[in-house]
Amino acid sequence: MMLAPSLGLAQTTRPLSFEEARAQLERSSDQIAASQAGARASRAQADALTRLHLPVITLDAQAFEYQKSIDISLQPAKDAVGSAADGFIANLPGLLPNVPSDLTAAIQSGLASKVQDALALTPNTLDLQTRQSVLRPTASAIMPLYTGGLISGAQSAAKAEAAGAEAQAQATGDIALLRLIQAYFGQQMAARLLTVSQETEASFAHHLDNARKIEAQGVIPKSQRLQAEVAYDSARRQSLAAADAYQTANETLALLLREDGALTPTTPLFVSTAPLPPAQTFVEAGLENQPELKRLKALREAGQAGVKIAKSAMLPKAYAFASYNLNRDDAVIIDPDWIVGVGVHYTLFSNIDRGKTVTAARAKSEQASAAVGAAQNDLRVVIATAWRQVETARKQFLLLDTNIAAATENLRVQEIAFKEGEATASAVIDARTALSLAQTQKVTAAYAYDLALAQLLAASGQIQTYGDHIARADKDVR
């Protein structure tokens, strides 16, 4: 039976289950908060681009004052009037056949004189100037009709960026959880190893006391008592080292959770006696859910969108536009009341080599695709390795139950034989050391199982289900 670790100092600690520690980590981690904020920002940015195909409607209001000067030539009009008047005067006899010819001639002479006088008084040019204050509110709209793939490319790129940010947030959360598992169960391991060390120290202290008594009775020589003292001193040193490791593990866990006081984990080291599902199951899950792989896939999608955007620069753009003057009564004469139409834009020459831009975008897309392939292969190796580590730790843990039982019985027999003078001190020391080693190996095997399982789940994108494995475990180390 393992005792609770004691450092000889009274400490106030707060019990904390693994799920409670996990919840506290999610609340206190700046890294998790930052990555989640980044993911929300990227998703909002992607959502902001979903309506790029819709028109943009704007309202503009301009208040201004203007002056306009116009020079109008009247000479053509004067010439036309003079010619028309001369024709009319010349036709007067025909128009007035009953009027005496001398009177008609007088009328013609008088009219011709008056017309000439009037034309002489009329200037050859007319100078006009107007000045006006105008309020011009207008509603305008422009809508893309064809962009050569620019809109769909921009939307795809934004979605890919959002997916990459979400994958990064998942990776940050998974790494934080993996660190918590390492620290939480590392503290449990340190506590159990301290207990083993304290039990070993107490056992060697008892053995040394027996050796002194038996030496005094002349049953054993001084050399065997000295062996017991050496073993006890070694056990004390190991116990002190275990206490330091335990204190370090406590501080590590408290710092990780930003806790001022000491914490006492209540979820023990665990092992499931049932073997894991086949490694291929985890490989399939990892290819679908592993966050780093999802991030690389998002980069590949962004690269494909980049190719589409680069190609759009080589294609024409078509758009529809409209404008309506909301204050027609006070409009400048040259301004239309409304206008509607379509337009086409095409860049004939660009100071950027658009062909090279497409080539660069394709190269980035190919780079991302190659990175995905490499990551998938690496993932298979990592998962296979972690799966075997979990299974190895599980088998070692189960075998150690028998070893501990045998080592415990051997120690009991050797201690009885030593008291009766039939066994040496070294035999007892060896038996106690063997038991301590088996107990230590059991603790470390359980921790190796827990940590390797976390690494396996992280590699397959399933570390968030770690609590389910704790719940299903049927062995623990307390």
Image: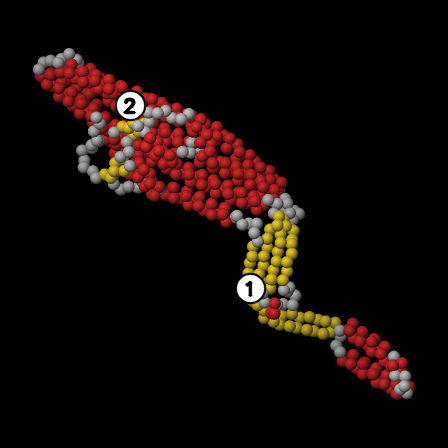
| Label placed on residue 441 | 2
Q: Please, what is the three-letter code of the amino acid marked with disc 1?
A: Ala
Answer left or right for 118 relative to 369: right
Q: Please, what is the three-letter code of the amino acid marked with disc 2?
A: Gln
| Label placed on residue 47 | none
Residue displayed at 44% across by 39% down:
168
Residue 339 versus residue 422 in the image, above or below: below
Residue, disc 1: 61
Choose top left, top right, bottom left or bottom right for residue 390: top left
Mark 2 or mark 1: name the one nearer the start of the chain: 1
Q: Quadrant of the N terminus?
A: top left
Other residues around mark 1 within 10 Å, as few (<14) / some (14–19) / many (≥20): few
Observer-nearest of 207 and 399: 399
Choose top left, top right, bottom left or bottom right for residue 289: top left
Q: CA distance from mark 2 to mark 1?
A: 82 Å
Residue 217 versus residue 180 in the image, above or below: above
Q: Position of residue 97 (x, y in %)?
A: 90, 84
Other residues around mark 2 within 10 Å, as few (<14) / some (14–19) / many (≥20): some
Residue displayed at 20% across by 29% down:
3
Q: Position of residue 195 (x, y in %)?
A: 22, 28
Answer left or right for 343 relative to 161: right
Answer left or right for 199 relative to 125: left
Choose top left, top right, bottom left or bottom right for residue 142: bottom right
